[in-house]
Image (spheres, rainbow, N blue to C red):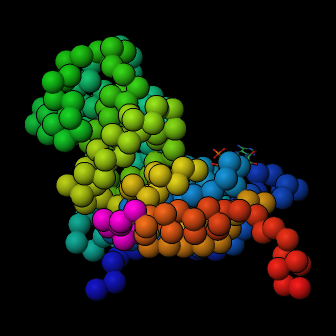
Amino acid sequence: MIPLPLIDVRRVTHRYGYHRAPVLADLSLRVAQGERLAVIGRSGCGKSTLLQIMAGLAHPTSGEIRLAERRYATRPIRRTLMFQRPLLFPWLDVTGNVALALRFDGRAREAPGRVEALLTQVGLAEHANTNVRELSGGQQQRVALARSLAIDPDVLLLDEPFSALDPLTRSDLRRQLRETQVAFGFAMTLVTHDVDDVLDLATRVVAMSADPGRIVAEFDIPPDMDAEARATLRAQLINALEPATFPLALSA
Ligand SMILES: Nc1ncnc2c1ncn2[C@@H]1O[C@H](COP(=O)(O)OP(=O)(O)OP(=O)(O)O)[C@@H](O)[C@H]1O
């Protein structure tokens, strides 16, 4: 069975200003139900712009974004965007920060049980009543993850959520996110310029070029790769991100 595309990006071109060069050019991308899609590219290639368009926070200059119709539910597809910094409310504790998402969604009555379950999932149950200012960067990002999941999104969009963290915390958080995605079943799209984010987390990756942002390569990422398969895929990804060098010499 072909997985249902939840977000269908169709031939999107985007310019910041009428006379400016396009940041994204004729870019198409589908996010399927339950998949962990990574978008990798060099700084400035348009990854965040693409994610904002996918989140509905920006409108493309041309092209369109189609969301799957939910024939089996009454509500439209839900998208949540998670950023590099956790953006928590510093005067609230962990529970208060996560519960706020439910309050904004008109579901405050669900908060006690749902917040507890989410905090257990992200490994923060024992910090439920801790003020978020007292948490480490990695713990704060896990609060942000629990808050993003509180409204039960169909698609979680992540804009370099680990880049402010040290390598060990980063690796822990990748594992946490992967386990949470498997447990909850939402689809995710992660933009990053870190190959390890891709290899540890994604089930599929698209590589973007810059000036303008286009998709130049796509790879499926098998689960449980051995070291050799991982090294091969790493080399293929890095190769896809390298600007072509000496094309004339190679074709001579
Ligand atoms: N609001 C804006 N107004 C004008 N130009 C913008 C705006 N936002 C982004 N840009 C430009 O669009 C291009 C792509 O930016 P974007 O942030 O989407 O790239 P990115 O791949 O996410 O970069 P990074 O990895 O460094 O975050 C850059 O040249 C940037 O300067």
Residue 24, by quadrant, is bottom right
Magenta range? 221-227
Find residue 35 and report its horizontal and vertical position in percent.
36, 66
Find residue 3 and report its horizontal and vertical position in percent.
33, 78
Q: Is residue 12 visible?
A: no
Residue 154, by quadrant, is bottom left
Tell whether 43 sits left or right of 112: right
* In magenta segment, residue 222: yes
Residue 154 vs 31, above or below: the answer is above
Find residue 45 and report its horizontal and vertical position in percent.
69, 55
Q: Is residue 250 visible?
A: yes
Residue 60 vs 125, above or below: the answer is below
Comparing 163 with 184, the one in front is 163
Residue 157 vs 82, above or below: the answer is below
Residue at 47 percent across and 52 percent down: it is 196
Exactly how many numbered labels are in the figure? 0
Find residue 153 and report its horizontal and vertical position in percent.
32, 53
Comparing 25 with 183, the one in front is 183
Residue at 53 percent across and 62 percent down: it is 234
Please tell me whether the stretch drawn in magenta is mainly helix, strand or loop.
loop
Tell whether 247 sits left or right of 120: right
Residue at 20 percent across and 55 percent down: it is 183
Residue 230 vs 194, above or below: the answer is below
